[in-house]
Image (cartoon, rainbow, N blue to C red):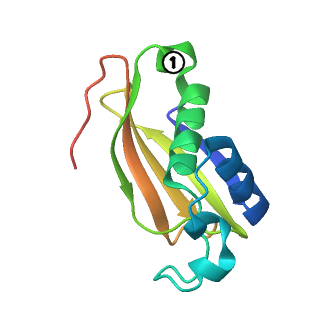
Amino acid sequence: MNSQCTREIAVSQPLIDAWAALSTDHNPLHVSSEYAATTPFGGTIAHGHYTLARMEELMLDVAGERWRHGGLLQRVRFRAPVRPDHVYVLTATAHEDTPDAWRLELRNESGELLAAEAEAVIGNGTIWRE
């Protein structure tokens, strides 16, 4: 198992709309640019559960069946909205002392903006604290 795994995620409004249809979450914050422009976000944003699904997907790549039978995302924090027409980089990094504990970060393409973060545990791994 590698100590780091990265995935690039291109977010578009058609992708957000498709996720809304799949999840049946048609909140106008996600699917109506006119409504979303009137909110503090100033435009549409991706669903939080879309970001969680992408984290789960990356951890499946990292740990395979071990994740499916005992993986857990914890301490998820949404730090900034995930916006359409942007590319994000999702990175999972193993804790050096606890290989079953991982830190996930979703950043914009330049790496400056932390949009979301989480801790992941495979099986009975131990989560570390910073």
Residue 25 lies, with reference to residue 34, above or below; the image says: above
Q: Residue at image x 36%, y 55%?
A: 77
Q: Residue at image x 51%, y 47%?
A: 49
Name the one closer to the observer, 44 or 104. 44
Q: How dense is the environment of label 1, judged by Cα within 10 Å: few (below 14), some, or many (20 and up)?
A: some
Residue 61 position, x and y percent, is 61, 28
Residue 74 position, x and y percent, is 33, 39
- Give residue 14's quadrant in the image: bottom right
Q: Residue furthest left?
A: 129
Q: Residue at image x 46%, y 13%?
A: 69
Classify mark 1: helix, strand or loop: helix
- Give residue 110's quadrant in the image: bottom right
Which quarter of the rendering shows the N terminus?
top right
Residue 96 lies, with reference to residue 109, above or below; the image says: above
For the image shown, how many numbered marks are present on the structure?
Answer: 1
Residue 50 position, x and y percent, is 58, 48
Residue 1 lies, with reference to residue 86, above or below; the image says: above
Residue 96 position, x and y percent, is 35, 34
Residue 8: in sight, yes or no? no
Residue 130: in sight, yes or no? yes
Query: Which amino acid, by three-letter code, is at mark 1?
Result: Arg
- Give residue 102's quadrant in the image: top left
Name the one closer to the observer, 108 or 39. 39
Q: Which residue is mark 1?
A: 68
Q: Residue at image x 50%, y 42%?
A: 92
Name the one closer to the observer, 108 or 68. 68
Q: Residue furthest right?
A: 14
Residue 76 lies, with reference to residue 110, above or below; the image says: above
